[in-house]
Image (cartoon, grey):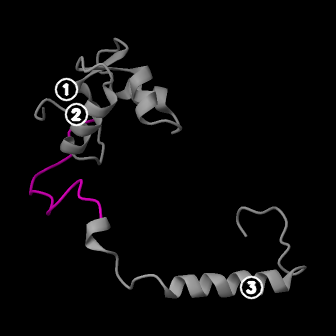
Amino acid sequence: MLAEATDFSKDHPDIVARLSKLAIEWKATLPIAPNPECLSKQITGEKPKGLKPKVNGSNVWPEVRAKAFERWDANNDDIMTLDEYQAGLNGQDNLETRFKNFDKNSDGKRTRDEFVGSSTK
């Protein structure tokens, strides 16, 4: 197992057999295809032709960035601070470096244009 330091399965074949049987029985109860109502609708339809990421080579659409900016700009002042960015992406790596990459004028703040691009508001 990837997350275990010691493999105890050989010492407890009865437990392995019981849990394996339970997992197989549970899997049999799952639907063949996902319920369409459970799928994300954040981005719908096909990507429009010519739409390219607008910020620092990111592969995230500007519309998605705009929604993230609105969520993370806690005080709705159209300026995102490092604290707001870190709270929005809680637990991810290199947040301070990533924040600075978008801070084009190095003023310690990210405007909507710096984060999303000037064409989306």
Mark 2 near mark 3, Cβ–Cβ under 8 Å?
A: no
Of the numbered discs 2 and 3, the one sitting upstream in the chain is 3
Q: Are marks 1 and 3 in contact (CB under 8 Å)?
A: no
The amino acid type of the residue labelled 1 equals Asp
Question: For this view, does 114 lie left or right of residue 90?
Answer: left
Region rendered in magenta:
39-55
The disc label shown at residue 116, or none? 2
Residue that extends furthest to the top in the rendered view of this protein: 107
Which element carries disc 3, helix, strand or loop?
helix
**Which one is closest to the eye, mark 1 or mark 3?**
3
Query: Residue 38 got which mark?
Result: none
- At label 3, counting other C-alpha atoms closer than 10 Å, the crowd grade (few under 14, some 14-19, many 20 or more) is few
Pointer 2 local density, CA inside 10 Å: few below 14, some 14–19, many at least 20: many
Please give the residue where the numbered disc 3 appears in the rendered image.
18
Q: Is residue 50 magenta?
A: yes
Q: How many marks?
A: 3
Residue 52, given in percent of the width and then of the height, sits at: 18, 48
Residue beneath the point at 30% across and 19% down? 75
The quarter of the displayed image where residue 3 is located = bottom right
Label pair 1/2, CB-CB below 8 angstroms: yes
Task: Categorize mark 1 by other alpha carbons within 10 Å: few (<14), some (14-19), many (20+).
Answer: some
Which quadrant holds residue 16?
bottom right
In terms of secondary structure, where does tag 2 sit?
A: loop
Q: Is mark 1 on a helix, strand or loop?
A: helix
48 or 6, which lies in front?
A: 6
The C terminus sits in image quarter: top left
Residue with the mark numbered 1: 113
Q: What residue type is labelled 3?
A: Arg
Q: Nearer the viewer, mark 2 or mark 3?
A: 3
Q: Is residue 56 above or below residue 83?
A: below
